[in-house]
Amino acid sequence: MSAATTAAPRPPAASADPERPQTRRRPRGSSFWRHRTLYLMALPGIAYFLVFKYAPMGGLVIAFQDYMPFLGIGGSPWVGFDHFVRLFTEDTFSMLLRNTLVISLLLLVFAFPVPIILALLLNELRGKYFKRSVQSVIYLPHFLSWVIVASIFYVLLSTDGGSINNLIVDAGGEPVPFLTDPDWLRPLYIGQEIWKGAGWGTIVYLAAMTAVDVQLYEAAQLDGAGRLRQSWHITLPAIRPTIIVMFILAIGDFLELGFEHMFLVMNSLNREVGEIFDTYVYTAGIQNGQLSYAAAVGLFKGLVGLLLVVMANRLAKRFGEEGVY
Amino acid sequence: MISRRNSAAVASATVLALTLAACGGGSGDGDGGDADGPVTWMAMLHTPTTPEKDGVIETALEEYTGTEFEMQWVPDASKEEKINAALASGTLADIVSLTQGDSTTVRTALTSGMFWDVEDYLAEFPNLSQIDPVTLDSARIDGELYGVPFQKIKARYGVVVRQDWLDNLGLEVPHTIEDLTKVAHAFAHDDPDGNGKDDTTGFYDREESFKVAFRSLTGYFGAGSQFEVTDDGQVVPSFTTDAYKEAMEWYRGVYEDGGVNQEFVTVQKQNQQDGIAQGKGGIVVTGLFEAKNYLALAESADPKTPMKWALVNDVTYEDVPRRILTDTGGGMGGWLAIPKSEVETEEELKKVLGFIDKLMDEEAFGLMTNGVEGTHYELDGDGVVTITDQTAWEQEVQPYSSSRPSEKIVTYKSTSPYVDEANELMAENEEFVITNPAQSLTSKTYDTRWSTIEQQVTDAYNQYITGAIEMSDFEATIESLRGQGLDQISEEFTAAYAEVNG
């Protein structure tokens, strides 16, 4: 790309010359040349993606090797699809797939709409300072690391002196093993995701809402629409493209639940419903030093994610929406 | 992170890398190449700053040993990368401290033949010839000794019990599993702290029960340390043995009775220490030296805490003779390895070994532990060592303490409670120690599969103890793991064991 920049003939600095010869059609690169400052500005970003996102992808070939750090990519033996065969034939594969899908689905159903609802509610607040302070407070959990979140919930929910169980016992109930009961793991996980991420997630929707034409609300008011109707018929449709883009992006992360959170809330007693690909990669791949196997699992997840994004995008376009590309 | 011992290919790669390095201009003959230069030593640094070059301790040690040496400090936090890179590129020192006994790269590097096999030379030196045979055994890899082992206390574990609670309830210090069961019951149900609330338990365990506290308890029942050798020479994981299952049944009984903290599966080490300091539980299976730390923690919260500990190192079960599982890999904290590329002749090797040998003398040990009398510490009439200049000690002496070839030359007396007692009891343990026979053996399947297998057994163990599954389910888990590599690991270890032990 930089080659094209230098190779192009150097036109006068002000390329908007009034007497542009009609006979000489500009080469195809001309639009590129006209926007050269824009491209120049994009250059650091492009370089970033090339260096930090695309170049490392080359490393994915280790998924088809028996990679050993000493030998490097050049020297490690090739094993073809062995690691994938191992993954798909592993006894735990169906459990991993089920857990990952179920949790992803629950996140999509329960956690995805929360920021939208929250943003709609915030949007209705009229007291400026009250709104600001509420916003700040609900952003806060986003900045806590999962370790902190998990510890807070541990202190609250433990049966060994946890506040919530103390309340339950004081009220005459039996302590509830929130942290070890497999049935509680998923609600706990989703609840923590919502607690941590919902406030932060409102930002993008609130931004979209500021773009809604105020006249629409005024017109609706004249027609006698209440607050609820205004939200339903004006705000929501206005942010629909945003919601859809966010939804497609969420679908792309379908199998990417992230290692940290689950690793922190999972234990021996609830692993059967908690073990997901990310945590499995840690024990089977990283702890055992099997980098190739870990890479194969990662690649598999990435491919499924890509497939889902493409499908969701198609679907969105079929319904007349914009999509992400 | 990469767990121990990967495969022969890595080893051959190392060799290749070395050969190439040697061909390409002899990065091999470094400082120690000629016999007159100082001995170079690549050692781990556990302190934030390096001691001054030619500082007081270095000079004193040089004077004492009659050998000039030069430390090349590697910060402990980055030792994996540094040591791996050094091994791969062959840029080593005359002595290389390899403290990661479990690391795949270290083990393959050792077996690749780049280091001297020191076995035959040890006998010539007064201290080296006295190294504990158990520790030597643990330090061998498939029968070969590729370095002088760092020697630690072999078994530091025991059971610590709240003495003040025992006194409150009029109980004796337990020395058998049976008594321990009774004490756990009493601690859980008879309000040992006398506050009128049902807020105490017996054993205060944590998430790592399977690998730490419970493993140590299984030793009393007769199970091995991770692996054991059967009468017919098979190397089997100890969790498949009857003694182990008996221990599980017993521990589950205690748990059901309320004698173990009910949610130990979620308790992290820090939570455990806090819980113990707060008086939630009165029995801990842990290093005997921990009693001091629990007390310090409790005192920091409440200076008037009634906490007192009884340290027990001789728990036995029925007619099983007294024994204790090692918690330090058989007293082996890694190797002081001597690369052939740096130390080229036998003569030089003997010089380096002589230096290490001298470091195991009492005087050198004292220099590396306490420093110089009058400058760093004072010795009173009872032989109690008091560090007088903490700052100077931390900067000048402490860095060397982790490089001591042996930690157990002298045990200095302390003024803190429980320290002397713990030291004494740990020394007693030495005689009864049980080590892991597989530690010095090689199995390829172990390298690739063990952490997955161990996790599944851990899960099954936790589920069994907490009552989620039954013994038959635990056995079923083991059976299914046999097909997933467990049997193969056993076979490979058995073959390696047979080869080493003839």
Image (cartoon, rainbow, N blue to C red):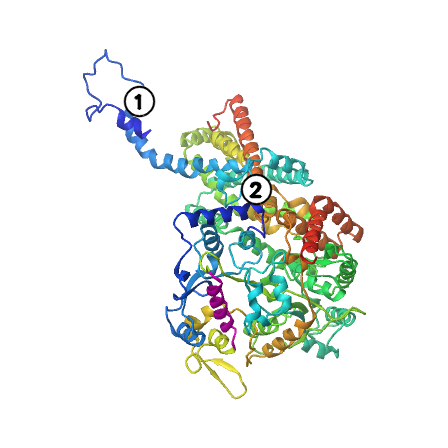
Residue at 70%, 51% (x, y): give it: B495
**Residue A313 within the magenta-colored segment of the rendering:** no
Residue B81: image location, x then y, percent: 47, 53
Which portion, as a residue range, is magenta?
A: B345-361
Disc 1 element: helix
Q: Residue furthest top?
A: A23
Residue at 52%, 68% (x, y): give it: B405
**Chain designation of label 1:** A
**Residue B346 within the magenta-colored segment of the rendering:** yes
Judge left or right: residue B321 versus residue A50. Answer: right
Q: Quick check: B174 above or below A70?
A: below
Q: Is residue B21 visible?
A: yes
Sequence order check, earlier mark of 1 and 2: 1
Disc 2 element: helix
Judge left or right: residue B61 versus residue A90. Answer: left
Task: Choose between B280 and B493: the one closer to the eye.
Answer: B493
User: Disc 1 versus disc 2: distance between alpha carbons?
Assistant: 44 Å
Q: Amino acid at mark 1?
A: Ser
**Chain designation of label 2:** A
The residue beneath circle 1 is A31
Task: Choose between A42 and A221: the one closer to the eye.
Answer: A42
Q: Amino acid at mark 2?
A: Ala
Residue at 62%, 75% (x, y): give it: B422
Rendered-image quadrant of the N terminus of chain A: top left
Q: Quick check: B286 above or below A89?
A: below
Residue A141: image location, x then y, percent: 50, 50
Give residue A294's mark. 2
Residue A7: image location, x then y, percent: 27, 25
